Amino acid sequence: MLTPSKTFHQPSLFETDLLLQLDPSDPLLKLSTVIPWHTFDEAFSIHYTEDIGAPSKPIRLMVGLLILKQLENLSDESVVLQWKRNPYYQAFCGMQEFQRKLPCHSTELVHFRKRIGAEGVERIFRMSVGLHGKAALEAAVHIDTTVQEKNITYPTDSKLAIRIINRLNKIAKVHGIFQRRTFVKEVKLLRLDIRHFRHVKKRAKAKRALKRLRTIAGILIRELRRKLPQYCLFDCYQQDFLLYERILKQQPKDTNKIYSLHEPQVYCVAKGKDHKQYEYGSKASIACTARSNIIVGVVSHEQNQHDSHTLPEILKHVETSRGKTVKQAVCDRGYRGKSEVNGTKIILPGKALKRDTHYQRNKKRKQCRRRAAIEPIIGHLKSDYRMARNYLKGAIGDQINLLMAACAWNLKQWLLAIFWLFFAAKHKAKISTATGDS
């Protein structure tokens, strides 16, 4: 059942008003006054029933928790706990009195993300772009790609085979199926043999151990298919068994390999880094304005495409998020092969053309040098706004985490602008006071 958010602030007669105890110049409180909370209430109310079910949490509270989580680099559990301890967090989410209890269970954030989906988070991101006004409508943007790593361990064939065996034994135990053999002790010994896979003299032994693990997994799959009830087999486990068989058959140099059981859509990306040769996750395209460094477009790609093939999707997202097309997009040499995409001119670093004037050469050189500003932005997204490792499930989780990280960056830029504006006004007042005293 939908619980409406409070649209206006009314001082309390019996308890001290929360806003009267806080610093009104705090940037977080100023941010709460410019965010159009009513638009979220109108947009997300369709996901709730009016009269049926238990009362829901206010939409402003849930949206505020999502923003604070990404803005402060907190987990779902931590942001709920910090909300209870921090009165500024409570005022940001629309509370009028200080609350002494947790606002909700941390799993409520999971349910809320599933309710609104990627489209709802897209609306929150567009709000963060719209706060910057004309600064977000620059004609030129910088575009680059990075990898948003998924929360999986480093994948190996032996590790996947052992996990498949453990899952099959667990299924048999849940349904009370008597197994001729569980292979638990043998799997422990085979795990020890695989440790020395890189050793020259023990590599053959490790390969035999991996082959034996695949054989054991195949034995358990066939046994469960014989003994499981037919309705249970086809309704619950048929897709899982097909996935397991595909993993057991894949070879090291196959294409479209599966690297995780719980995240089968993850793919391997090689970006040529010395410290990390391979990254497992999804490729993400990021577009920011050339001067103000506001992120105006982000896209998470479900397939590992060449950088030049990602341009139409990211340019379309920039147009939908800010309502204006891009005239120029400055990219690096990884986007070779494209000079124009849907009316947008693509500028790449390279040798100067003979027909270019001296002014045109200097202008292009400055544009390509300025493009490097997007690299530290990507670094901040990963280190400060939870994009280094994505804990949300599935391809939708990749898109949601990327959108919220970009939203947090834009809101942080707005907070910094307010801070420096307040600092400049305070400094100017101090100078005028000192001049008047003298």
Image: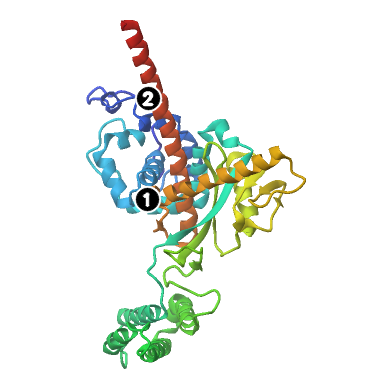
Measured Cα–Cα span from mark 2 to mark 1 = 36 Å
Provide the residue designation for mark 2: 423
Q: Amino acid at mark 1?
A: Leu
Q: What percent of the width, then of the height, locates residue 45?
A: 47, 42
Residue 156, quarter of picture? bottom left
Q: Quadrant of the C terminus?
A: top left
Q: Amino acid at mark 2?
A: Phe
Q: In the rendered structure, are the residues bearing label 2 and label 1 in contact, judged by CB atoms less than 8 Å apart?
A: no
Q: What percent of the width, then of the height, locates residue 259?
A: 45, 72
Residue 179, quarter of picture? bottom left
Q: How many marks?
A: 2
Left or right of 356? Residue 417 is: left
Crowdedness of circle 2 by 10 Å Cα count: few (<14), some, many (20+)? few
In the rendered image of this protein, does residue 65 appear above or below residue 131? below
In the rendered image of this protein, does residue 225 appear above or below residue 405? below
- As helix, strand or loop, the secondary structure at mark 2 comes to helix
Q: What percent of the width, then of the height, locates residue 183?
A: 30, 89
Frontmost of labels 2 and 1 is: 2
In primary-sequence order, the first of circles 2 and 1 is 1
Q: Which mark is residue 389?
A: none
Q: Which mark is residue 109?
A: 1
Residue 73 visible in the snapshot: yes
The residue lying toward the viewer, choosing from 313 and 47, is 313
Say which residue appears at 37% left-offset and 82% top-offset: 198
The residue lying toward the viewer, choosing from 366 and 404, is 366
Q: Quadrant of the N terminus?
A: top left
